[in-house]
Image (tube, grey):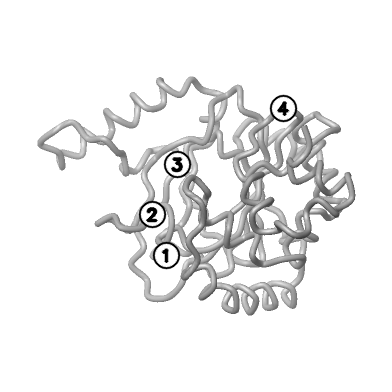
Amino acid sequence: MINDEQVEHFHRQGFFLLETPFGGAQISALKRRQREIEPLWVDSDFPEGYNRGACQFLLMGEMLLQLVEQPELLAMARRLLHCDEIHVGACGLGDAGQTVSAGKSRHQVHWHADGGPEVKQVSLRTALDFHGPDNGPLRVLPGSHVRIRAEVAEELRHLELATGKHEEEPDEFFVVHPHEVAVHLHPRWTLVWTPSAWHATGVKTAIGPRRAMAWNYFPAGGRRRDSEAVKHIYADQWQHWAGERQQLWGLLD
């Protein structure tokens, strides 16, 4: 499914793109399903600490579970992680404006990294709507996944201060980094990357939705952020799943 050059680019730069591994008909079906379950998701009060984006993802049901479980995707993740035993430790669906940046004055996600060089993970991110330059595209800092987090944070701090926009020390950084890549993600392409790389989003000024779906594969012993959400959404089902599926979704010790 992937070649040596893509593997090398992932380890060196932290990302690559491939043609979305499910066709246009599936994307259309996913959009319809997302619209169906969104009212339920909006009206639901999930337990404290649960990631709301993950809950929306899981409410999609078998349609998404089976996409995540495609053998060729699992093989790709194993190759990139150099690990035979992997699991899904995080997932999400929807518009970051309704989750990550909800309630904030700025419809934009600041620079951050979901882990440092020691956190090995492979994330597949597919847009359900075109994330063009005016629709809050994901911004990735290539190679930052192998750099010390404090070093990158200090670099961004100085770049942010250099904009001249702040009278006080900023808590969050949105500045354009000279080496960043803005990923204008079209539904026909899937971003394969590590969220251990520093990332942010552009400003959303376009009218209309900015939906995406993503899930992260981790090696044995890796993060299991959303395992309790899986048990919650599939409360009457997960214990009857095959052991292989329970393991893949991080439900077994």
What is the x, y in percent for residue 182?
A: 47, 51
What residue is at 76 percent from the left and 29 percent from the top?
220
Q: Amino acid at mark 3?
A: Glu
Label 1: which secondary element:
loop
Question: Which residue has dot 2 on it?
Answer: 202
Q: Position of residue 54 (x, y in %)?
A: 58, 54
Q: CA distance from mark 3 to mark 1?
A: 17 Å
The residue depicted at 36 percent of the width and 58 percent of the height is 102
The disc labelled 4 sits on which kind of residue?
Gly
101 above or below 166? below
Q: Relative to the observer, which residue lies in front, 128 or 175?
A: 128
- The disc, 1 or 2, on the residue closer to the chain's N-terminal end is 1
The residue that label 4 is drawn on is 221
Instruction: Please report contact status of discs 3 and 1: CB closer than 8 Å, yes or no.
Output: no
Residue found farthest to the left: 167
Image check: 114 left or right of 174? right
Name which residue lies at 51% across and 59% down: 184
Q: Which tag is nearer the camera, tag 1 or tag 4?
A: 4
**Residue 180: which disc?**
3
Q: CA distance from mark 3 to mark 4?
A: 31 Å
**Residue type, numbered disc 1:** Asn
Pointer 1 with pointer 2, Cβ within 8 A:
yes
